[in-house]
Amino acid sequence: MNKLVALSCGTIFGIGLVISQMINPAKVLGFLNVFGEWDPSLAFVMIGALIVSSPLFHLFKKKEKPIFSESFSISENKEIDKKLIIGSILFGAGWGLAGLCPGPAISSIALFNVSSITFVTAMFVGFYVTKLSRDD
Amino acid sequence: MNIVNFTPVSALIGGMIIGFSVFLFFIFNGRMIGVSGIASNFLISKNNRIDNLLFLIGLILGPLIYSYFTKQKIEVSITNSLFLLIGGGILVGFGTKISGGCTSGHGISGVGRFSLRSIIATITFMIVGILTVLIKNIL
């Protein structure tokens, strides 16, 4: 059942990206263009996602275990350190350069365009290099 | 500042669908959705590898299913500059792996749980994203 949930959640998430048009980098870059021609839509996507997910998290967070799994695996990391800030700065720069973040980038592979595939490949290289550069 | 191309209704509805998907993954599988985490763990870790792969396949299936049923063409305009795509991609991969999340992981899942760590990450990448676009427009 876990597998079916994973596939379904990915699909629903992808449909949300299409309906909200966040799959389109032009919309994302429009949001980041605060000092020019600004398109505030992305803020409404986040508000929409939060008004649904946030109350439900808080309602069910005391639940002992999830429906199809033995336990919740949720990050307990509370540390606000250099890694968090530097990583977020690098991510923000890449996001602003291409207008793509991981979700929309992977979803837009559905359109078989070379740009999405190039970006996602480079992103996976970034993941891999980070993994290699660590001791663990 | 000049407001253009603003689509609040579709943005809100699409966002709610995304939020619902995040909740379903949490309540059924006990996991938080962060696409960078799912994608990088699929590459790097054996844990939940099949689940992670299926989620990523779903992300790609979503737009296909949507356009099949609505007969609508999905509009996407992506730069074809190799510098922006490869440079941006590497920075996104690197940055999200170091900071432990992206727009979904920190911005939605983390902020939704009121995680201070994620709130700070989200503010940081938003400001840097805005500055990057500003600098790009000046150059």
Image (spheres, rainbow, N blue to C red):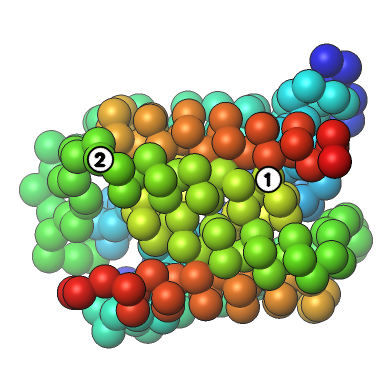
Residue B8 percent coordinates (x, y)? 75, 26
Residue A49 percent coordinates (x, y)? 52, 36
Q: Earlier in the sequence, mark 1 or mark 2?
A: 2
User: Within 10 angstroms of label 2, few (less than 14), some, or many (20 or more) residues?
Assistant: few
Locate residue A82 relative to residue B104 in the image: left or right. left
Same subunit, tags 1 and 2: yes
Label 1 sits on residue = A96
Total number of numbered discs in the rendering: 2
Q: Which residue is the extreme one toward the front?
A: B139
Label 1: chain? A
**Mark 1 touching mark 2, by CB under 8 A?**
no
Q: Residue at x 49, y 43 (%)?
A: A89
Q: Residue at x 85, y 41 (%)?
A: B139
Residue B70 percent coordinates (x, y)? 84, 58
- Find numbered disc 2 in the image and state the secondary structure of the residue it sits on: loop
- Residue B11 visible? The answer is no
Locate residue A63 relative to residue B113 in the image: left or right. left
Label 2 sits on residue = A81
Q: Which residue is the extreme one toward the left?
A: A64
CA gap, disc 1 and disc 2? 23 Å
- Quarter that holds the C terminus of chain A: bottom left
Of residues B50 and A76, which is closer to you in this image? Answer: A76
Three-letter amino acid code of the residue under disc 1: Gly
Three-letter amino acid code of the residue under disc 2: Asp
Relative to B139, is B29 above or below? below
Q: Residue at x 90, y 61 (%)?
A: B73
Label 2: chain? A
Of residues B136 and A35, which is closer to you in this image? Answer: B136
